[in-house]
Image (cartoon, rainbow, N blue to C red):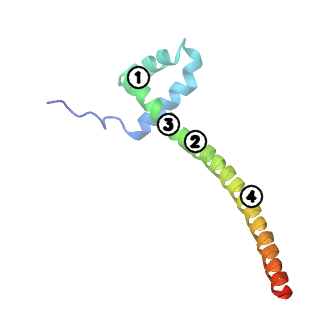
Amino acid sequence: MMSKTRNKFSPEVRERAVRMVGEHRADYGSEWEAMTSIASKIGCTAETLRRWCREEASRRMAPAAQATDDKARLKLLEREVKELRRANEILRKASAYFAQAELDRQGKW
């Protein structure tokens, strides 16, 4: 049976480790080297720290991605509103034209 070490590190330790990777990335040849070094100092594996970093990056990107989606959706909806207003104007003019034509036709009889 595998032991469950999922919650071995507190959220504070995880956040600090992820922050350290970002702060000290330039001190190493690669991000992986930074993760390996920092992971050994806090007592986790480099792969665990890599996963924490990716999860944090995903959390940070979610609002930005949502904002981009919202902007695109807003632009699409604004375009649709403009098209619907144009269609309504055409229908209003057509309705007035046909109403006048009907009045003219009734007046000739």
Percent of width and height locating residue 83: 72, 57
The answer to which of marks 4 and 3 sits earlier in the sequence is: 3
The answer to which of marks 4 and 1 sits earlier in the sequence is: 1
Element marked by disc 1? helix
Distance Cα–Cα, label 2 vs label 1: 29 Å
Between circles 2 and 1, the one closer to the viewer is 2
Distance Cα–Cα, label 4 vs label 3: 36 Å
* Quarter assignment of residue 50: top left
Element marked by disc 4? helix
Q: Which residue is mark 2?
A: 65
**Amino acid at the residue labelled 1:** Ala
Between circles 4 and 3, the one closer to the viewer is 4
Tell me whether the residue at label 4 lies in contact with that at label 3, contact meaning CB atoms closer than 8 angstroms: no
Between circles 3 and 1, the one closer to the viewer is 3
Q: Residue at x 39, y 21 (%)?
A: 46
Between circles 4 and 2, the one closer to the viewer is 4
Q: Is residue 97 above or below residue 75?
A: below
* Residue 82, numbered circle: 4
Element marked by disc 3? helix
Q: Is residue 50 above or below residue 103?
A: above
**Amino acid at the residue labelled 4:** Lys
Q: Is residue 50 above or below residue 89?
A: above
